[in-house]
Amino acid sequence: MPVTQAPITPTYADSPPGPPVLELTGISKRFNGIHALNDVGLTIRAGEVMALIGENGAGKSTMVKTLTGIYQPDAGSILLDGKPVVLKSPQEAMQAGITAVHQETVMFDELSVAENIYVGRQPTRAGGRIDWRRIEQEAEALFARLEVALPVRARVKDLSVAQRHFVEIARALSQEARVVIMDEPTAALSQREIRELYRIIAQLKAAGTAVIFISHKFDEIFEVADRYTVLRDGRFVADGALSAITEAELVALMVGRAVNDAYPKAQAEIGGPLLEVDKLCHSTEFDQVSFTLRRGEILGFYGLVGAGRSEVMQAIFGMTPGVTGNVRLEGKPVAISTPSQAIAHGIAYVPEDRQHHGAHLTMPIQQNISLPILSKIGFFLRGHRAHETQIARHFAEQLELKASHLTQHVSELSGGNQQKVVLGKWLATDPKVIILDEPTKGIDIGSKAAVHRFISELVTRGLSVILVSSELPEVLGLADRVVVMQHGHVRRVFERGEATPEIVVAAASGIELESARQEENAA
């Protein structure tokens, strides 16, 4: 499904005068042979808010970690005020005037606000003793400058998320930061707190600070940012003035990829409802989630950070207490409050974090695969090992597992082969429904292709699949229908033929494209 987009020529007419404060050229970073960033460039000037835009996995987080000294690039250069710099650590990045305000703040909870602002660089008095009075006075002056009422002696553990962000911004000001990176800063804020953050961003801009603003919310981007830079698959796509582009054009730049034969789609007969979820609710994670999974169907779930997709799946698998709503399997109500009950009902869940929740890395392959079915094969019965080996070999062959032997520890395998072990482990339970949460996250292209083929084949064997993925081509290429979530709610459900990249990302971002409005009117 090709994406049609008009060419966008970057223009710097709206940029403040003067040379760039920060300039990246040819930045590349590889992990296990895979490019997280590939020849990326970025430019930002004093007093400018630059929106860094891209899908999940586009390279934004790697870019932030490179700018803050956590990662060092394999190639390329970073210029500050036109001079090359090498940022070997977060401390060096801060000393150079680059700091970040993250969605999840990292501070010392038991220390006070003032102590957190000056931790590691406290001013001292004669004799080398810390000048606590000066620390508190300077912290108060910083908050007065920000026009924020925050007691500097308060413990950070007692602050709200927004107040923690203000402490990080004050810390950046205390270090005379030239560049402040805000990474999804509004994800857990109320509307009032968001407006307060907007005001502070305007203050930073007026003071000549360069701000890199990362958000999945297009209304925020167009409200606070002057310019944009779009990354896709670790590559630079486009940049320019936000005044010269529409939301629809930005979406097209983000997702401008065709879904092609890289995602094989086996033909399977789709039957009636198998799993029905009705008004599933949790007080903090999701609300009124309803959907139906049909026999022989691959049902895709897509959403941006914080959409609540994984939380819903964990609830269905019995991992989350305090959930209300109804679940029916094969037309019959089922009550699932533990994973063992879910397995008994024929539901399997392959988690996103395979290393911590999916596999026992220090155990052999065959023991990992047999773990969920020990009660069936009899751990202490004669012939147990032979049966275990037979089952493990069966799934190792089906999944094209690359290992020296079945007694090899999972920790010795590549990421892709670890994922195959986790898949084999849950398929060995002979499920009716298998939930795959980010099944190809962090694995190489070859292993991805094998997993894609296997997912496509699962439904031909009578299984029904829920595929949760942040990779839009993966969802569109494999799913029969796509459920789009945003902020814990089901926003839309698309049939395979109508699920284009533009309207899916638009729905996940909470914006309306003209094509989406036309479809709704036609319906």
Image (cartoon, rainbow, N blue to C red):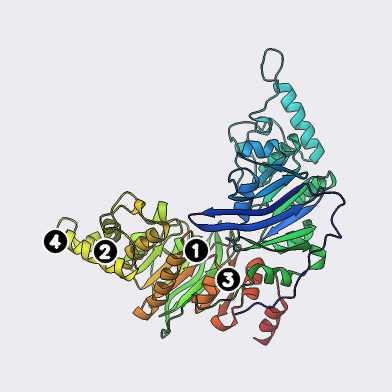
Closer to the eye: label 1 or 3? 3
Is the residue 378 above or below the residue 511 in the image? above
Q: Of callouts 3 and 2, which one flags the residue occurring earlier in the amino acid sequence? A: 2
How far apart in space, not on screen, are marks 4 and 1 (Cα)? 39 Å
Q: Secondary structure at mark 4?
A: loop
Q: Position of residue 514 (x, y in %)?
A: 73, 78
The residue beneath circle 4 is 383
The residue beneath circle 2 is 392
Q: Of callouts 1 and 3, which one flags the residue occurring earlier in the amino acid sequence? A: 1
How far apart in space, not on screen, are marks 1 and 3 (Cα)? 13 Å
The residue beneath circle 1 is 312
**Mark 3 and 2 residues: CB-CB less than 8 Å, in contact?**
no
Q: Residue 51 versus residue 504: which sits nearer the camera?
A: 51
Is the residue 43 above or below the residue 377 in the image? above
How far apart in space, not on screen, are marks 4 and 2 (Cα)? 14 Å
The answer to whether 469 appears left or right of 106 in the picture is left
Q: Quadrant of the C terminus?
A: bottom right
The residue beneath circle 3 is 484
Q: Residue 53 versus residue 372: which sits nearer the camera?
A: 53
